[in-house]
Image (cartoon, helix red, strand yellow):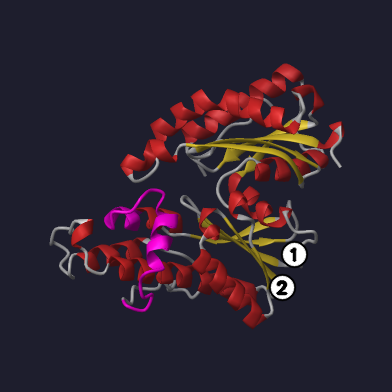
Amino acid sequence: MATRSNLVLGIESSCDDTAAAVVAGGREVLSSVVDSQAALHAGWGGVVPEIASRSHLESIPNVVARALEEAGVGLDDLAGIAVTQRPGLIGSLLVGLSYAKALAFARDLPLVGVHHIEAHVYAATMEWPTQAPDPTIALVVSGGHTALYEMRGPRSMTPIASTLDDAAGEAFDKVAFLLGLAYPGGPSVSKLALEGDPKAIRFPRYRAKDGRPGFSFSGLKTAVLYHLRGGDALAPTPAPEAIPDRADVAASFQAAVVDNLLRPTLQAAQERSARSILVAGGVAANRALRAAMQAAGETHGLDVRFPSPAYCTDNAVMIAGLGWHSLAAGEHAGWSLDASPR
């Protein structure tokens, strides 16, 4: 139940979405506003940091005001403010953090910094009436991050593995660009993949030399590029309309990404005797990944949970939700709180 003592304003600006939300008690969503910059970056095939930070500057006052208005509360009704501190694009992070600091200082409100990736993990728990059975393996997979965590509660997340190079979502964006598809690449590749054969092309699956769970997507992107060039690394990349098997490429690439995410996650779950798996981040909205992970969960007796699509991509609900737990535990950040890209 929403009361003045448990209302938290969340602010998120780690990449290219400006977001604000009001959440009560870490779970009850009173408002969620997201201002997307996708159209600004579409022509570049990816996020341009300088454009992103400037857009945040323009958008954040209105986004925060809308979140408070939709929740029907004012700043004086809040118990505190939670803001993304890391990781992310440093310029983008500084915009949200500076704005949150100013609000907290002006109204003498407690402030807490939130880890963006841990908040994505928390987002996968918010909509479920019961907590996932511990221990839980959390897979966070987005445009900027691909990582595994062991979770034993909202404030207990231990890193297991992260990508050695590119994130899965970034690989989707680059392959979409090669195929002449719209940005962001995840939805457009997934849509085209429905028309193709996922077994038509055997793209590589990454396996760490030491046998531990891990991720790498740069080799997969290169394999797609070489396939499009007919196996000749020095040949020119064909125009999208000249690619005869675009749908098969999309479907086979997506299948490789799903395999590269599924295997390490199941391996980590087995090694840690996990009882459940949480999948979060923008790529968690991918239907092929959801279907494969749910099927694997049924086979191995694991409780598999995803957030709804609205909470897969960057949002401030997850920031306010996880931030409430820190505030409730008595954690307050000082004015020296700073942003960090990692």
Residue 177 part of the magenta segment: yes
Kind of element beneath mark 1 = loop
Considering the image in quadrants, where does the N terminus appear? top right
Residue at position x 38%, y 53% from top?
173
Can the viewer see residue 167? Answer: no
- Residue farthest to the bottom, as pictured: 299
Q: Which residue is mark 2?
A: 275
- Residue farthest to the front, as pictured: 195
> Which mark sits nearer the N-terminus, 2 or 1?
1
Position of 88 relative to 59 (above/below): below
Kind of element beneath mark 2 = loop
- Spot occupied by residue 264 in the image (x, y as percentages of width and height): 53, 71
Do residues under tags 2 and 1 come within 8 Å of each other at their CB atoms? yes
Q: Which mark is residue 79?
A: none
User: Could you say which quadrant of the image residue 24 lies in?
Assistant: top right
Horizontal side, residue 286 vs residue 197: left or right: right
User: Could you say which quadrant of the image residue 221 lies in?
Assistant: bottom left
Q: Amino acid at mark 2?
A: Arg
Q: Amino acid at mark 1?
A: Ala
Q: Looking at the image, which is closer to me, 276 or 270?
A: 276
Residue at position x 44%, y 26% from top?
54
Horizontal side, residue 321 vs residue 295: left or right: right
Position of 326 relative to 128 (above/below): above
Chain part drawn in magenta? 174-200
- Spot occupied by residue 341 in the image (x, y as percentages of width and height): 50, 40
Residue 305 part of the magenta segment: no
Q: Which residue is mark 1?
A: 132
